[in-house]
Amino acid sequence: MKSSHFYYIILFSFLLAACKDDGPGEKENSDNDVPSVATNTWLLNSLDNIENYSNSDPENRYDINMVRNEYESVQLVIQTDSKKRLKIERIGNNDAIEFQCRKLEAFNGKYDVLIPCDNEIEPDDKVVRAWLTFKVKSEAEAKRHKEIIRFKTDDKEYAVAISINVVNASLPETPSIASVFGINPQNFIFTGLSEEQKIEKRKAASDLLLEYRISPYFSTWLSGTMKTECFSSPYAWNDDRTWEYLADKRFNRIALPSHGLSDGELEMMLNKARETGLLNKAFFYVWDEPTYMKEYHLIGQYSQEIHKLMPEAKVLTTFYCGPKDGKYKDRLFSVFDLWRGDTQIFSMSAWALQANEANADTCRSLLRGNEEWWTYVCMGPGEEQPNLLLTMDGYQHRAVLWRSWKERTTGFLYWAVNAYAESDTLAFRKDLPEGDGVLIYPGQYFNSTSPVVSIRMERWRDSMEDYEYLAKLEKKIGRAKSETLFQSIYQSPEKYSKNNAEIEKFRKSILEILSK
């Protein structure tokens, strides 16, 4: 009888222990902390138009599949019953996942601006619009991680649960494709700042772009022409901090200056680039979009000055047309022969391809030796083709690097992220489509001490991460099989998926292959 009594005591103790929490972390990360039925919250895909949130059912749970070093974002809408600020609480404090909440604000009638929140967020007309971003750290364990995010006033609480499935794979620290974006240094307000403060302001913008898998460069047009001076460092070329900064592994490519340097200075800089192991990443962008033969001759002159000092150095030239005069007038593909020896990186407007992939094939076939073919977007292309314009939908933003992978370019260039109409105003240039050349906004207009990014920048980074998925897939199963799989979401520059479920299914299929 005693042994039987002892058995029931042991059994009761076991059941009691099983019903207990595993500790504060497990309890706080339980989905039970989130209402089973959502009533005032909507969780939307990062590609959705948040203005249409009420067309879908309320939701307070969301699943994400990710790899290490990847970012993913979810849009959140909360209909509140007051205009009170909501305090933001992240439950669990998961060290393997970084979290950021930003308020989504409209500019020129489009929700595009992401303003960092300092642990609280203010509704607009009793509606909170937020952008929740998660980054999986490089040391994160491959498993399912739970995130509970609460938004609270003194008498009300709204909670959402985000389930992040981390797959056993990682994105490379150095991007697999050259993605070089320009920063206009003249479009910063430097009034009253010391030289060192100006440097810090430039560096803040450059650092921000590096977080988006972008190799930044500062670009200045000289003497009222298309002659350009480009440099990837916020410091002077002969400042030791330059070479430490450019050694950051997140740079895929670095721009070096030439026009403002004497032959001796240029040679010293090239030798420094070689000594630091950075010459293979370097390029010189000496002229933008030449159109007449006299400009072609100038490019040749500048290029030869560089190559006589360092023959292996690379010069990049952008183009959207052939020469407008001379023997090869209006012959687009003639530039490959006319610039041979002077230009090593042929950066072509995606608009000039006219959505015809046969033109992309022609460009690749014309390359010789160490030459490269990149693309860029500026003004065009429009209609349904991928681009980063404000008036375009999220799928067009996301598909920019899908196109690059399909057309097998080795680089993508974007002319400027801060090409405002004037340095002291927040306005787009009237001679460009809305949003062209503006992917970050001056922080001072949004109560921020640092530049703030656009939704289009976020979608760009997602596009870059998709490219990394495809690069890994191609390495594992080959180009032909990868293209077959890619067909499920992308067929051509005018035909690609605008369905979130299809895109997520494609991503999951890649993750299943990569995790094996």
Image: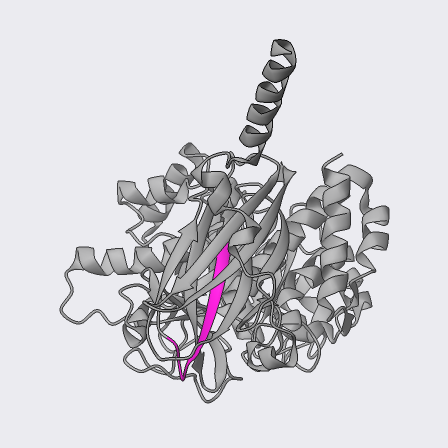
Residue 21, above or below 504: above
| Relative to 139, residue 375 above or below | below
- Asked which colour scheme the image uses, the reply is one colour
Q: Main secondary structure of the magenta part?
A: strand
- Name the residue nearer the viewer: 322 or 131: 131
**Furthest residue in direction bottom, as rendered:** 430
Q: Looking at the image, can residue 213 be seen?
A: no
Per the image, is 509 magenta? no
241 and 444: which one is in front? 444
Q: Residue at x 55, y 31 (%)?
A: 16
User: Outermost residue toward the front?
Assistant: 1
Tell me where residue 408 appears, x and y as whole percent: 72, 55
Viewer-closest of 236 and 508 = 508
For the C terminus, give its image quadrant. top right
Q: Is residue 169 visible?
A: yes
Q: Residue at x 47, y 73 (%)?
A: 129
Seen from the viewer's position, the closer of residues 95 and 70 is 95
Q: Viewed as shown, does residue 377 lie left or right of 120?
A: right
Residue range in magenta is: 123-134
Residue 438, quarter of the rendered image: bottom left
Q: Is residue 403 left or right of residue 33?
A: right
**Residue 314, image x and y in percent?**
54, 50
Name the residue located 50 percent from the left edge and 82 percent from the top edge.
110
Q: Position of residue 15 (x, y in %)?
A: 60, 29
Split into 4 quadrants, where in the image is the N terminus? top right
Q: Is 107 located above or below residue 307 in the figure?
A: below
Find out whether residue 132 is within the magenta segment: yes
Q: From the viewer's perspective, is 512 left or right of 216? A: right
Q: Is residue 191 above or below residue 265?
A: below
- Residue 506: image x %, image y %? 76, 55
